[in-house]
Amino acid sequence: MKPARPNLTFWQLWNLSFGFFGVQIAYSLQSANISRIFATLGADPHSLSFFWILPPLMGMVVQPLVGKFSDRTWCRLGRRIPYLFLGALIAVLVMCMLPNAGSFGLAVGGAMIFGLISLMLLDTSINMAMQPFKMLVGDMVNEEQKAKAYSIQSFLCNAGSLVGYIFPFLFAWIGIANTAPEGQIPDSVKWSFYVGAAILILCVIYTTFKVKEMPPKEYAQFHGIEEQKADVKSPSMWQLLKHAPSTFWTVGLVQFFCWAAFLYMWTYTNGAIADTVWGTTDAASEGYQTAGNWVGILFAVQAVGSVLWALVIPKFKSIKVAYVVSLLVGAAGFASVFFIHDQYLLFISFLLIGVAWAAMLAIPFTLLTNSLSGDHIGTYLGLFNGTICLPQIVAAACGGLILKLVGGAQVSMFLVAGVFLVLGALAVKLIKTK
């Protein structure tokens, strides 16, 4: 039966998410290089996870606010796009600042503080730019096409990740310096951030011109919202949480284990493979910086695995079965890193990790948005981001302690990540779907 809400063409769905390509380049540069940057500035390995508290903390604050305010915003540019554009502009400026944290003649403490402030601003702006894309799909796509729309978004997300991850390796390969004086960031990393910033703003400009959001009356009709609700005071975020569908909480539990696992991957991959493959733990050494470039390649392989698995997920008859299988395959990938000491064999590990990542990008939002009405979808998606941010904050706060408990070798944290994904797969059973 033909859906009550009209279908969009492929290119309309593509345009809704195209700017995500640029935003994800910025996010992948951050996730692949933050530990490398702060280790180069002089951070102790047992303290590295603390630097990862800021990004999810800012996301936990910013994304619900962007959702709530954009639900009640309307201007010439639309409802979500103004927040997207402002976030992208700030991100571009900060991406030019962060990799220069060690280049201003500051002492180690001063460089760390400068880097932390830059990281806080960068993640705030990336979150402001990222969340509207999820909301645009919820706003403008009917239930029949949401899985397809989020799959396109997942593809663009992974394509952007692929580009961002390989930048440092690519720039070092063409001859840009991959080492620098002690306490300074190599030029290969700096130019990665500069070029990523340029691509980000161009992609966001494309989305701004190509996407026309629905005016309030059309939006209300599309989502079946009663007109008189416009005059009713908007419920608070606490009230919305109180009445959130059970899917919100059960999917959120799965998210907790998944995002904690990936936080440890982002934090410890550089130190782990520098130790197990290049035989060094000295952040100033050429081997450590070479390992840093190889981290980008491994994360790019993960993105390839994710793109390929995204094509397989729709073949499953049950979305919950797809979720469980994906997380268990990812758990095997994490565990295998502990036993592999060859840089090329690690491709297998990260292809398997990409399977879990594909499921994490698409399945939770499909399950959630199909359980929501349209009048508060932005706020709910912003609140749901807490199920991404809170586990990262908890994992980051506990990272140093867990590292000591597992013996101090950073590669051991991959076993911990594997256990978390197994727990996430077990928690999928709690999700109820209609």
Image (cartoon, grey):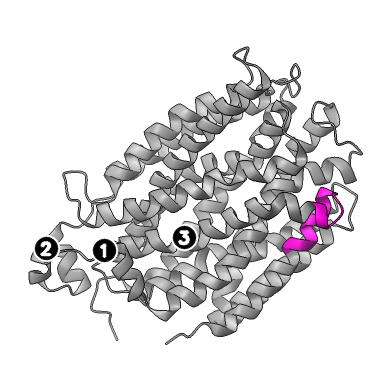
Secondary structure beneath label 1: loop
Q: Mark 3 highlights which residue?
A: 386
- Per the rendering, the mark at residue 217 is 2
Within 10 Å of the Cα at label 2, are there few (<14), some (14-19), or many (20+) other Cα atoms?
Answer: few
Tell which residue pokes out farthest to the top in this image.
105
Q: Is residue 362 left or right of residue 129?
A: right
Q: Which label's residue is closer to the chain start, 1 or 3?
A: 1
Secondary structure beneath label 2: helix
Within 10 Å of the Cα at label 3, are there few (<14), some (14-19), or many (20+) other Cα atoms?
Answer: many
Residue in the image at 38% along x and 33% along y:
89
| Residue 300 horizontal/vertical position (percent) | 67, 48
What's the residue type where badge 2 is placed? Lys
Query: Does 2 lie within the magenta span?
Result: no
Q: Mark 1 highlights which residue?
A: 236
| Residue 53 horizontal/vertical position (percent) | 58, 47
Query: Does 406 lie within the magenta span?
Result: yes
What's the residue type where badge 3 is placed? Gly
Q: For the stretch drawn in magenta, what is the main secondary structure?
A: helix
